[in-house]
Amino acid sequence: MNGLYMNVFAFVFLETPPLFPSPKKLFSLVNLAALGVHTLLYGSEIDACSQDSIVSDHKNSKTTTNLNNDIDSSKIHKKKRTYVEIKVVYAQNMLELHTTTARKYGKWWSQCFLTGIEQILLGFRDDYGIVRQIQPLLIKDIETRARTWSSSSFLSFLNEFCAFVRKTITKDYFEDGKTVYLFYFSPEEKKIKWRTTTESTYQFLPDWFISQDFSSSEIFPSEHKQ
């Protein structure tokens, strides 16, 4: 039920929200990041962005459009985007969240940190699912208050996991019959394990993408640009 509350709550921030909000409509980013010697390419779901965010319609566009649909030629090629994560919690105020000890806030931090989100917008709901109060929560404040985890331990683990992945996957995707490696945590053994599969269910890269010549400057065909 909490997922339903969050999706409905997210549409409150639209100027003209739809009559029936659809939880299937998602906005995602593809992130390129570096961690030590590792280069990471991963996708992430975004709930919202602030009104002063600037979004370019086309790669070579000479103007940019903000969320109010106003064209401002003075903001050419700027890439200012302030993303916001939206959460709905069953509580009356921030003091009831126990951010110092509850480990779920570590998950919130890692989710936002990897996406470059600096702020969570919290909706405090009552027994009837009605959001009674909205309050911002900075990601850096979650990290500062934490007593059962630390950002350095998370990043250290991620760095070691990336090294483990590089050591495990030694063959190219195309040379190995489009083999996909699935990593998972085994609670019984307390280890991260892996297996391989060629099932189409796990082959998430579309044909139009893997058939591209990445040596050219135009990587994505125009019909797939966002």
Image (cartoon, rainbow, N blue to C red):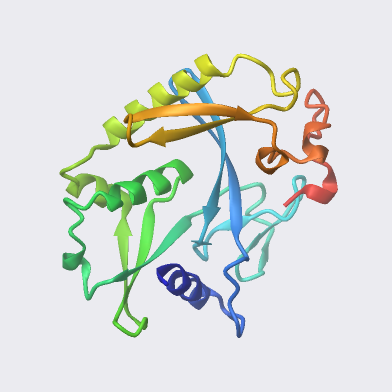
Front position in the image: 20 or 141: 20
**Is residue 221 depicted above or below 197 in this figure?**
below
Q: Is residue 39 left or right of residue 103?
A: right
Report the quarter where the N terminus lies: bottom left
Residue 8 in the image: x percent, y percent? 49, 76
- In percent of the image, x 46 and y 35: which residue is there? 184
**Is residue 51 depicted above or below 165 in this figure?**
below
- In percent of the image, x 40 and y 69: which residue is there? 2
- In percent of the image, x 36 and y 83: which residue is there? 130
Residue 137 in the image: x percent, y percent? 30, 60
Q: Is residue 111 left or right of residue 204?
A: left
- In percent of the image, x 54 and y 58: which residue is there? 53
Front position in the image: 71 or 194: 194
Residue 70 in the image: x percent, y percent? 66, 68
Residue 68 in the image: x percent, y percent? 61, 71
Give the residue furthest to the front: 188
Q: Is residue 209 left or right of residue 25?
A: right
The image quadrant that residue 200 belongs to is top right
Count of picture labels: 0
Front position in the image: 55 or 21: 21
**Is residue 204 depicted above or below 198 in this figure?**
below
**Is residue 85 depicted above or below 166 in this figure?**
below
Q: Is residue 200 left or right of residue 31?
A: right
